[in-house]
């Protein structure tokens, strides 16, 4: 299994934890070996060139790379897809004055991506705006993965 680097959620931590959990019960060193690509773009290049047999890549990166012609849709198959989770987030301090917090939120959710580098980078995946998220709900999988990552390395 080709992973990106230890700081990556979708390219490293999530695959280790999710493969360890049911129904798979797979552990690195016991059920599969690990190699490192250094990044998701490198993982996609490795799959496209048949250098790697399997790689963990986030679906939005893969969609962008297909749209940009970096890999053909028929050159790979997805064998597992996790629940989605936010790739990044903007926030503000909890004690920001409510009127200012509302203005910050409004500026972000109403920001028009048309003609920006955001549209260019994310448009091929259908992403075209910032959305409001809830830390408790939308990052639940990420928190679960972070809580479990230390145990994913333990071969039993």
Image (spheres, rainbow, N blue to C red):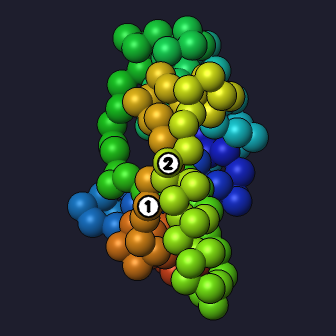
Count the labels in the image.
2
Q: Earlier in the sequence, mark 2 or mark 1?
A: 2
Q: Position of residue 11 (x, y in %)?
A: 58, 48
Q: Is residue 94 above or below residue 139?
A: below
Q: Which mark is residue 36?
A: none
Point out the residue furthest to the front here. 99
Point out the residue furthest to the left here. 23
Between 142 and 106, the residue placed more toward the observer is 106
Is residue 24 found left or right of 143 in the rendered image? left
Q: Quadrant of residue 13?
A: bottom right
Q: Quadrant of residue 150?
A: bottom right
Q: Residues within 10 Å of mark 2 (few under 14, many from 20)?
A: few
Q: Determine the secondary structure under disc 1.
A: loop
Q: Determine the secondary structure under disc 2.
A: loop
Q: Is residue 59 above or below residue 7?
A: above
Q: Position of residue 95 (x, y in %)?
A: 63, 90
Q: Residues within 10 Å of mark 1 (few under 14, many from 20)?
A: some
Between 91 and 136, the residue placed more toward the observer is 91
Q: Residue at x 47, y 22 (%)?
A: 124
- Mark 2 and 1 residues: CB-CB less than 8 Å, in contact? no
Q: Is residue 126 above or below residue 82?
A: above
Residue pointed to by mark 2: 110
Q: Nearer the viewer, mark 2 or mark 1?
A: 2
Q: Residue at x 68, y 28 (%)?
A: 117
Is residue 58 found left or right of 11 in the rendered image? left
Q: Is residue 155 visible?
A: no
Is residue 76 found left or right of 120 in the rendered image? left
Between 67 and 114, the residue placed more toward the observer is 114
Q: Residue at x 75, y 40 (%)?
A: 38
Point out the residue furthest to the right here. 38
Residue pointed to by mark 1: 132
Q: Position of residue 155 (x, y in %)?
A: 52, 71
């Amino acid at each position: 299994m080709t992973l990106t680097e230890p700081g990556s959620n979708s390219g490293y931590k999530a695959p280790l934890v999710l493969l360890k959990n049911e129904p798979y019960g797979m552990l690195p060193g016991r059920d599969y070996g690990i190699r490192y690509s250094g990044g998701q773009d490198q993982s996609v290049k490795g799959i496209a060139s048949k250098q790697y047999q399997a790689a963990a890549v986030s679906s939005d990166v893969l969609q962008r790379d297909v749209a940009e012609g970096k890999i053909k849709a028929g050159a790979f198959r997805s064998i597992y897809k996790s629940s989605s989770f936010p790739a990044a987030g903007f926030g503000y301090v909890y004690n920001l004055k409510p009127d200012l917090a509302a203005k910050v939120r409004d500026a972000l959710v109403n920001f028009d991506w048309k003609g920006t580098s955001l549209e260019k980078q994310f448009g091929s995946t259908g992403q075209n705006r910032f959305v409001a998220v809830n830390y408790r709900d939308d990052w639940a999988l990420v928190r679960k993965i972070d809580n479990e990552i230390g145990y994913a390395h333990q071969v039993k």
